[in-house]
Every structure is written in C-alpha cells, then in structure tokens.
Image: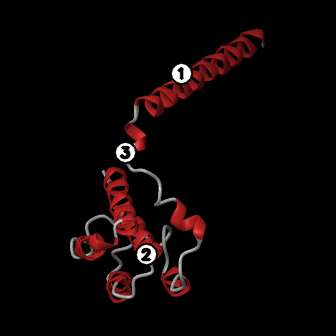
Amino acid sequence: MWWSRTVAANGLVAIAIQHPQERERVLSLLHGLFSEGEDPEFLGFTASYLLDLNDSSSIPILEKAFDLDLIEEDIVSREDLQQDREEPDEETLDQYNSDLLEFYEPQQVAKRQARWEEERREEELLTAQKHCLLKGK
C-alpha cells in the first residue's frame, strides 16, 4: 500500500515545484500525513521528498516525526535532515520537472508494453536455458 501513496506524494512535490502557487497547499497536505504515523516506509519517502523541496517549515515536523519514530530511517535519516538544508541540485529538481501526464500518452504506453514483452521473452529464454542445463546434468 505504501508504494502507491509514495508515488502520489512524489507527484504532489512535482506539482509544488512546477506550480509555486500550489506549494503551500501541497506542504500543508504532506505535513498533515505525519500526524497519521501508521506507515514508516511511506513517511520515510515523503520526508525525503519534503527535503527535496528545501522548505524550512518542514524541518520541525520531520524532527518531531523522527523523535516519535514515525519515519523508516533506512530510507531517510536524521542525518539526512541536517545535510539536506541546502538548495536542491539540478538533478534532484529534474526528476520533478517532467510532464506528469506523459506517462499515460499512447506512445509512452506502447514503449512500456514493448519493453515488458521483451523482458518476458528474455525471461522465458533464460528459463528454457536453465531447464536445458538441468536436464543435461
């Protein structure tokens, strides 16, 4: 369940970056998630996205979440909280500047489907090769 929520949180951060007029609304929503506290993995990824925004209002919320052990520290640590107080670099920002709807464009869907089909064929080939090797023993 945490994965789909994480993708949504990532999309919200992209909206906050691409549409600064929505930043406060996005921050308010994301900050509110830390009062739930039921999903440390999800909150760990959400904390890392908030750090990407370099928003000072997030720091006390994240510090409290760390104090309450709400964040999976294998994903983001208290040390990351201290280190990430500088402006995000271009590479970090680039991941949020893509067109969020591009994923659903027919040519993008077709490319993914072709890749999945190729991966399926490769997996079948590997399975057949393993089967032949085992039979040969």
Residue in view at x 48 percent, y 83 percent:
81
Please name which of the two marks, 3 or 2, marks the residue nearer to the observer: 3
How far apart marks 1 and 2 lie (CA) works out to 37 Å
Label 1 Cα crowd, 10 Å radius (few <14 / some 14-19 / many 20+): few
User: Split into 4 quadrants, where in the image is the C terminus?
Assistant: top right
> Which numbered tag is attached to residue 101?
3
Cα separation between marks 3 and 2 = 21 Å
Among numbered discs 1 and 2, the one appearing first in the sequence: 2
Residue sitting at 22 percent across and 76 percent down?
35
Q: Which mark is residue 117?
A: 1
Which quadrant of the figure has residue 11?
bottom left
At x 21% / y 71%, what residue is drawn?
36
Residue 121 screen position, x and y as percent: 60, 18
For this view, does 30 lie left or right of residue 100? left
Q: Which mark is residue 53?
A: 2
Q: Amino acid at mark 3?
A: Leu
In this rendering, the answer to whether 43 lies above or below 99 is below
